[in-house]
Image (tube, rainbow, N blue to C red):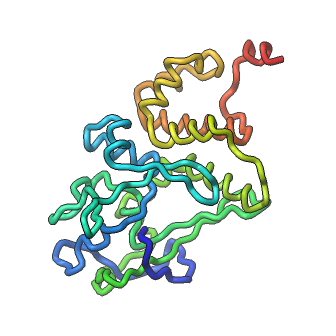
Amino acid sequence: MKKQGKLEQVALTPESRFKFLCHKGIKCFNQCCREVDMVLTPFDIIRMKNRLKLSCDEFLLRYTTPEVLEKTKLPVARLLMGEDEDKRCPFVTEAGCSIYEDRPVICRSYPIGMGTLMKQGAKEKEEFSFMVKEPHCLGFNEDKKWSIREWREDQGVDLYDKMNQGWIDIIIKKKTMSAAGSTAELSDKSLQMFFMVSTNVDKLKNFIFETKFLQVYDIDEDVVERIKSDEVELMKFGLEWLKDVFFGKNNIKIRGETLKKKG
């Protein structure tokens, strides 16, 4: 979550237990909300921009900066910190987080870090947890005990992971390919499409409904209606479409007429 911090080199299971509690009365309250290096997930952005009553363009311009993930070369949106000496999160106040109910998944998970590994040749991802302990954090001195599972449920992490699964799948697949020595690079257009789907459901909606997209792809009418009215369903659909484009998954069928023209 931050550039500095001790990561405990112990694999934690859902039933692993730990002591932790963060509250307004603790001396270090809000200290973890400074100098945060945080990539925002697609579901993060939808929740945050709706909480702030902003369009995607407005939110991205005001609160984020584009960044390229080193191992995958995929473009993402990183949350901008304040320009003051403390480099505080723009949403933190003396009373705590001003968007607490819609805070990003990294904030929800803290102090538990989550990782996912896709081994070469494996059919399923291997997920693991680890503890992040920073010198300033006094929450570990509190008496409240949790299991990893209980903490995730209490903080709403599972919902965020479920909504972001398609995005995570793409990043892991691209990382695995790179680790295996693949030299295949996504085109600039493909990278632009990834950034659009990951960060801007407004533009994604225009792309699907204002271009020939629905003439090219054979999509059930109920799906069309669902993605037209629900931003989260639209985001999830866009991520499944990206898997088709990037990795040939064929989750979304191309219309027969289009295939004939290509042939």
Q: Quadrant of residue 136?
A: bottom left
Determine whether 198 is above or below 11 in the image: above
Q: Quadrant of residue 139?
A: bottom left
- Seen as rendered, the residue at the extreme right is 263
Say which of 197 and 67 sits in front: 67
- Seen as rendered, the residue at the extreme bottom is 141
Percent x, y for residue 33?
A: 30, 67
Could you tell me which residue is drawn at 42 percent across and 60 percent down? 38
Could you tell me which residue is drawn at 68 percent across and 35 percent down? 245
Percent x, y for residue 171?
A: 61, 53
Say which of 162 and 191 sits in front: 191
Could you tell me which residue is drawn at 18 percent across and 61 percent down? 93
Could you tell me which residue is drawn at 57 percent across and 70 percent down? 128
Determine whether 107 is above or below 147 in the image: above
Percent x, y for residue 192?
A: 56, 38
The quarter of the image holding the C terminus is: top right
Say which of 145 and 63 sits in front: 63
Count the numbered circles shown.
0
Percent x, y for residue 83?
A: 28, 60
Q: Is residue 60 left or right of residue 76?
A: left
Determine whether 233 is above or below 97 in the image: above
The quarter of the image holding the N terminus is: bottom left
